[in-house]
Image (cartoon, coloured by chain):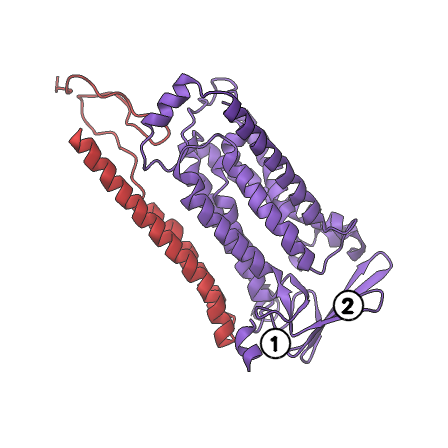
Chain colours: A purple, B red
Amino acid sequence: MIRAVASLSWPVLDRVHFGSTFAISPHGVGIAFGYLLGSWWVLREGPKRGVKEEHASSMLFWALIGTIVGARFFYVSGHLSEFNSFTDMLKIYNGGISLIGGIVGAVAFAYPVMRRHHYRFLQVMDSAAIGLPFGIFVGRIGDLVIGDHLGKPTSVPWAFAYDGGHLSGFSCTGNVCTETLLQGLHRHTLEITPQVARLIYPTGVVQTGDGVHQTAMYDFLIAGSLFLFMYLVMASKPRREGVLIMTFAIWYGMGRVITDFLRVDKRWLGLTGSQWSTAAFAAVSAFVLVRWAIQSRRRPPPPAAAALRTAAPSGATTSFTPPAEPGAGRGGVP
Amino acid sequence: MNEQAARNRGRTASEKTQRIVVTALVVVSVALVFVASAVKSYLPLFFVWIPQLGIPVFLSRTDPRPATPVPSAASDAPAATPTEPPAPAPTDPPTDA
């Protein structure tokens, strides 16, 4: 009884079918909706940081293409053994994308546009620093609906218990769903029923639990709390260019590093691809922020900056960096 | 000076309201996930998108609007936008020609 009340569960919905040939994945709807609402934040924050709205729109368009390409490319690179042909790799509608790959692809495709309009990299990235966690916060709902990213078995009170429906990536018969993950010659098998979850390791060791870790929900909570932190705390007063996006990289990166240990996924030297990449981004960002903090303690602020700080109104919500007027040449990082 | 202080006070109050509403909408979004679990249905999960969509809708309506140019022959100066620093106040009020 206690377990029934404490654990999380709902029937999952893999696809919404329209007739016999057409279906929409709630996962895809979530991603599209997340990108749309995240973009709204970029268009709101960009002009405050000197990024013209039409230029931000142009960057968002190319970033959208980059997101699709990067998300699929990163997933295919990490799961090559799952694909039989090049055509299979292009079938993105069958599922299989990487969020970190999507972010990297978006930045890579938007970068030439930001350089063409003579914006600084950190100036544009800071404009996206609130939109990124918000987009993830919105997009993860799709994962929750389809029951994606189910992790290792556990009996914690917030364990996710299977409650019917077709789990994405699993083969389900009756109320038993099974997923097999091949890593080289090793085979992991995750078996989930409404009563119990079992993970059978290649060594034959069996880990059991009342349910599994719902790692997409952990990501949803991490992104939601990060969004609030960025909106309520970080954007509430002027900050040096780059601080916002590096805060995002550290918070979200460390969150992914921790929660990915609970996932059943392919690993290289003990870590998933997302853990390697987010750990690298978080480490670089932490190094730069610490370096800036040390530098600012050693050096007194220039008189102009000090005057600006005193003149800034208490209700200022964003850092105002004098915009590099597009077409007026490259602006240096202040 | 008093007018400026009053304007700042109004602006702060508006931002405070925005923060409270945004926080509340985030809390509602998270709560709906637990509602989905309580009623054993995925439908409340679709409703999470409503408070999430409400955040940009609410902020769009309550964000201070950028000043629009007044159709007047008196001034050719461009209106101040959030991307530009405010122009210094003229010493003499503009007069019609």
Could you tell me residue A125's position as x and y percent? Answer: 53, 35
Task: Identify the residue shown where x is 65% and y is 79%.
Answer: A195
Quarter of the image for residue A281 reads: top right
Residue found farthest to the left: B96
Q: What element carries label 1?
A: loop
Q: Mark 2 lies on which chain?
A: A
Which residue is labeled 2 in the image? A189
Could you tell me residue A148's position as x and y percent? Answer: 63, 62
Q: Quick check: A295 above or below B8?
A: above
Observer able to see residue A277: yes
Q: Quick check: A322 above or below A152?
A: above
Which residue is labeled 1 in the image? A164
Decide which of tag 1 and tag 2 comes sooner along the chain.
Answer: 1
Q: Image check: A176 left or right of A125?
A: right
Quarter that holds the N terminus of chain A: bottom right
Could you tell me residue A64's position as x and y percent? Answer: 56, 43
Residue B68 or B56: which is nearer the viewer? B56
Residue type marked 2: Thr
Quarter of the image for residue B71 reads: top left
Q: Which chain carries label 1?
A: A
Residue A208 or B51: which is nearer the viewer? A208
**The label number, if any, that marks residue A228 in the structure image:** none
Residue count near mark 1 (Cα–Cα under 10 Å), binned few <14, some 14–19, many ≥20? some
Q: Image check: B78 left or right of A271?
A: left
